[in-house]
Amino acid sequence: PPAPGTDTDALARLIDLAFSDPAPETMGETHAFLAVQGGRIVAERYWRDYTAAHTYPSWSEAKSITQALIGILVRDGKVDVHAPADVPEWKEGGDPRGAITLDMLLRMSSGLKFAEDYVDAGVSDVIEMLFGGGQDDVAAYAASQPLAHDPDTVWNYSSGTTNIVARCAARALGASGDAFRDFMFRELFAPIGMNSASPKFDAAGTFIGSSFCYCTARDFARFGLLYLRDGIWDGQRLLPEGWVDYARTPTPAVPEIETLKYGAHWWLGMAGPGSFSCNGYEGQYTVLVPEKDLILVRHGKSSLEAKEAVQGWMADVARCF
């Protein structure tokens, strides 16, 4: 059961609302919900035929997994996030993109042109990259984009930058495709028990770290617990000291109009000050609330118009604890 002091009546009402059948128009479908406090599951529910064994799409939650992989490479001395990123397309002498660092990419401040539009394929780089002409080599598609702004001056959320980061990780490791998948399981997934993880790769062998790593809700919670425990699992440090703090350090260039702030491939503030989260398209969320030792996982199918309602629901749930 939840810890003493939890408003269990309010929590039950919120969960009942989310799992209404038919689904509430304000939120869309909620397929899975999981709350973990003190390292233990304290609430869990699934919709219709969905179960704890079902794997759910990550969409952009995968970006935070990519950030963890970079952390492991930092731990092993294989990359320096403040050095120019290893991007072949930017190696020509005088190319201003050559000044872009992994840090700028992780904080979405590279300055590269990229239209993150999920509806209109006519102006959407993300749709063209994932499902159109760029799908066979997603990193090459993203790396071919010109600068729209000087590096490290403007924030622009971009799935393309994450796929550049994923290829940089593969180049630093000297492994792609199945060999990179083996690295993901050996260094990240297996140690924390994320046995359901199913990362997807393009034809060039690059992990599509912007968008595709299916997992059970419980395994997304395991990933959250790794970050809630400062990168340590069962006494073993998997992420370098300070890496979690780096993930949740605000990026200065994020405009004031953004409801949530942004760190390094993690979103900030959904469940109040100090909270940080992996956020994915159609309402996939893993939200960490350190002051309450709390993890909330939600998967479903919600429209873009419902995004603020779902995020508000997550914040309301966090307040129950």
Image (tube, rainbow, N blue to C red):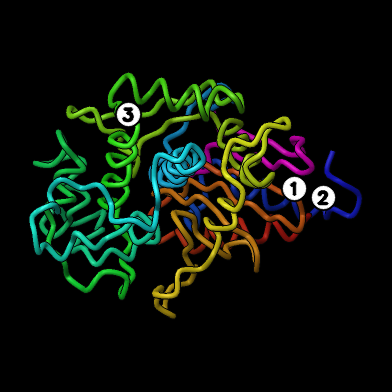
Residue corresponding to mark 1: 12
Amino acid on which disc 3 is placed: Lys
Residue corresponding to mark 2: 8
Amino acid on which disc 2 is placed: Thr
- Residue at the (54%, 59%) spot, across then down: 311
- From the viewer's perspective, tell me whether residue 238 is left or right of residue 35: left
| The residue stretch that appears in magenta | 29-48
- Residue at the (18%, 61%) spot, across then down: 97
Residue 132 image offset from top left, x and y in percent:
12, 41
- Residue at the (57%, 41%) spot, across then down: 239
Mark 1 vs 2: CB contact within 8 A:
yes
Residue corresponding to mark 3: 200
Amino acid on which disc 1 is placed: Ala
Residue 55 image offset from top left, x and y in percent:
48, 27
Q: In the rendering, which numbered label is found on residue 288?
A: none
Tell me how far mark 3 sits from mark 2, CA to CA.
38 Å
Outermost residue to the right: 4
Image vertical order of residue 45 relative to residue 114, above or below: above
Element on which disc 2 rests: helix
Residue 318 image offset from top left, x and y in percent:
70, 56
Q: Which of pointers 3 and 2 indicates the residue nearer the eye?
A: 3
- Nearest to the observer: residue 293 or residue 110: 110
- From the viewer's perspective, tell me whether residue 292 is left or right of residue 270: right
Comes first in the chain, label 1 or label 3: 1
Image vertical order of residue 308 relative to residue 244, above or below: below
